[in-house]
Amino acid sequence: MKAALQKKLLDSFIEIIRKTSAELPKDVIDAVQAGRKQEADASRGKYAMDIICKNIDLAKVKSAPLCQDTGSILFFVHYPHKHDYDVLQKLFKKAVMAATKKGYLRQNSVDSLTGVNNGTNVGPGSPTLHLEPWKKDSYDIRLILKGGGCENVGAQYSLPDSRIGAGRDLTGVKKCILDCVQQAQGKGCGPGVLGVIVGGDRATGYLATKEQFLRKMEDKNPNPDLAKLEKECVEEANKLGIGPMGFGGKTTLMGVKIGALNRLPASFFVSVSYMCWAYRRQGAVVSGAGEIKKWLY
């Protein structure tokens, strides 16, 4: 890959990181504002939603991170098959280091054994890169920045689960989802969005929950049973009274996105990832020449 193309791609990657960190996409802002309208005037829930909305506005104006925890860096990329995989890996890591230096990302990534922070956000497992070649000449680059607080309250269930009375069916899946919300009690910086996978193994299930966050808030699940379950889970979670930040109120969840993977007969996992209100997800189509042509959210 020629140096000039590498430079253009690097600049585009850095801009995708900046925009993801500082600007929530419209579908998420619409969901936040809808939640704000649901909360009673002078309530703690309304106060929390007001602060969230002010934070969103300020971050965009100042091009500053929405949250002090800029989170795990998860790239999901399709790239032209003629381009070199190893070069692209290095470019994405270089973009993360440059974005960190510019302040678009905070210095969040530390060595798990020593606690040492090298200040670059680059190390084993950071950033997480899912790079797949395709036959198109353009790139499809999607980025999720997922904070540690919401990551901490994710959960995985193995059904049947006698603790919550969940069997191996969609009713059991719903019990898992609502139990996860109940256990979180606002600790994940709610109102949140859940990515859920039925099936798979422990590793593939959790990875696929993150991919559910690439869906738009207003989309409808193509599987009618899962579409119904998504709607019911949001409605029932919002009747729990947990509310924004756990302060009480009507907006505990803004959305639930559910997918399914094949499983072994011996296993029935339900994996749940929790995304905070700072739902930092963005994507862009980048031309083969390295220029951003279209924002995807």
Image (tube, rainbow, N blue to C red):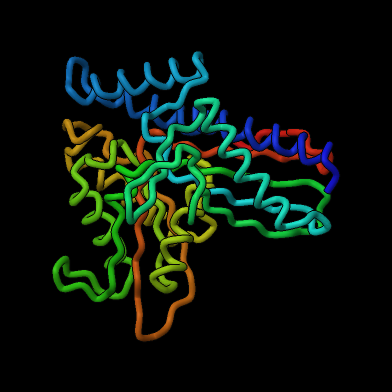
Where residue 56 sits, quadrant-wise, is top left
Where residue 168 sits, quadrant-wise, is bottom left
Is the residue 155 above or below the residue 20 in the image?
A: below
Q: How many marks?
A: 0
Quarter of the image that includes the C terminus: top right
Q: Where is residue 33 drawn, in percent x and y?
A: 39, 24
Q: Where is residue 41 drawn, in percent x and y?
A: 21, 16
Is the residue 204 above or below the residue 226 in the image?
A: below
**Which residue is more in the foreground, 19 or 200?**
19
Q: Where is residue 55 drawn, in percent x and y?
A: 38, 20
Left or right, 203 with respect to 156, comes to: right
Where residue 264 sits, quadrant-wise, is bottom left
Image point (21%, 47%), residue name: 184
Is the residue 223 above or below the residue 159 in the image?
A: above
Is the residue 67 above or below the residue 242 in the image?
A: above
Left or right, 43 with respect to 198, comes to: left
Image point (46%, 68%), residue name: 204
Left or right, 215 with respect to 246, comes to: right
Image point (51%, 54%), residue name: 211
Image point (44%, 17%), residue name: 57
Q: Residue furthest bottom?
A: 266
**Which residue is more in the foreground, 158 or 176?**
158
Q: Where is residue 143 drawn, in percent x and y?
A: 56, 43
